[in-house]
Amino acid sequence: MSFSLQKTKCEVGPFFEPDKTLKDGHALAVGDVLGIGSPQIVAGWRAMTPRGAPGIRLYVPGDAAGVGAQRFEIGGTEVAVEDLKLADLDGDGRLDIIAAGRQTKNVRIFSISVRGRSGGKKG
């Protein structure tokens, strides 16, 4: 299965405002997932209390004033994220997102598509 990044509205100041839509946030990772030469933040959550939809979100910082900051939905609703890691698992030079769910008893690997490069869910 393939996926694409979906841009969502992001409130910004000098830093990202707290994201009140995250429920039971359990995992953070920092790395250059997009290959743009600066780090992004990857956040995963379980959404167990109260019940909701779990997911993974990618935060791309803007300039020092927060201008140009973006937030993308990666997906991952099938895994209640307990932990996540970043690593280049397939040797393509890009970081993959590895998400593990204890409650859902699964692991999913996501590869990001950037500028026409293919990406998708692995495993």
Image (tube, helix red, strand yellow):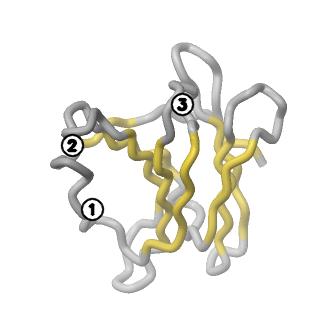
Viewer-nearest residue: 93 or 5: 93
Q: Which mark is residue 9?
A: 2
Query: Cα distance, mark 1 to mark 3?
Result: 21 Å
Callout 3 crowding tier (Cα within 10 Å): few <14, some 14–19, many ≥20: some
Instruction: Name the amino acid, label 1.
Output: Asp
Residue at which label 1 appears: 19
Query: Cα distance, mark 1 to mark 2?
Result: 11 Å
Say whether disc 1 or disc 3 marks the residue closer to the N-terminus. 1
Q: Residue 3 at x, y = what percent?
A: 54, 35
Query: Cα distance, mark 3 to mark 2?
Result: 19 Å
Instruction: Name the amino acid, label 2.
Output: Lys
Q: Is residue 80 left or right of residue 73?
A: right
Within the image, what quadrant is residue 117 found in? Answer: top right
Residue at which label 3 appears: 34
Viewer-nearest residue: 80 or 86: 86
Q: Is residue 45 left or right of residue 18?
A: right
Tag 3 and tag 2, C-beta contact below 8 Å: no
Number of marks in the rendered image? 3
Q: Residue 30 at x, y = what percent?
A: 54, 51
Instruction: Name the amino acid, label 3.
Output: Leu
Say whether disc 1 or disc 2 marks the residue closer to the N-terminus. 2
Tell me the residue at 69%/31% (across/down).
Answer: 94
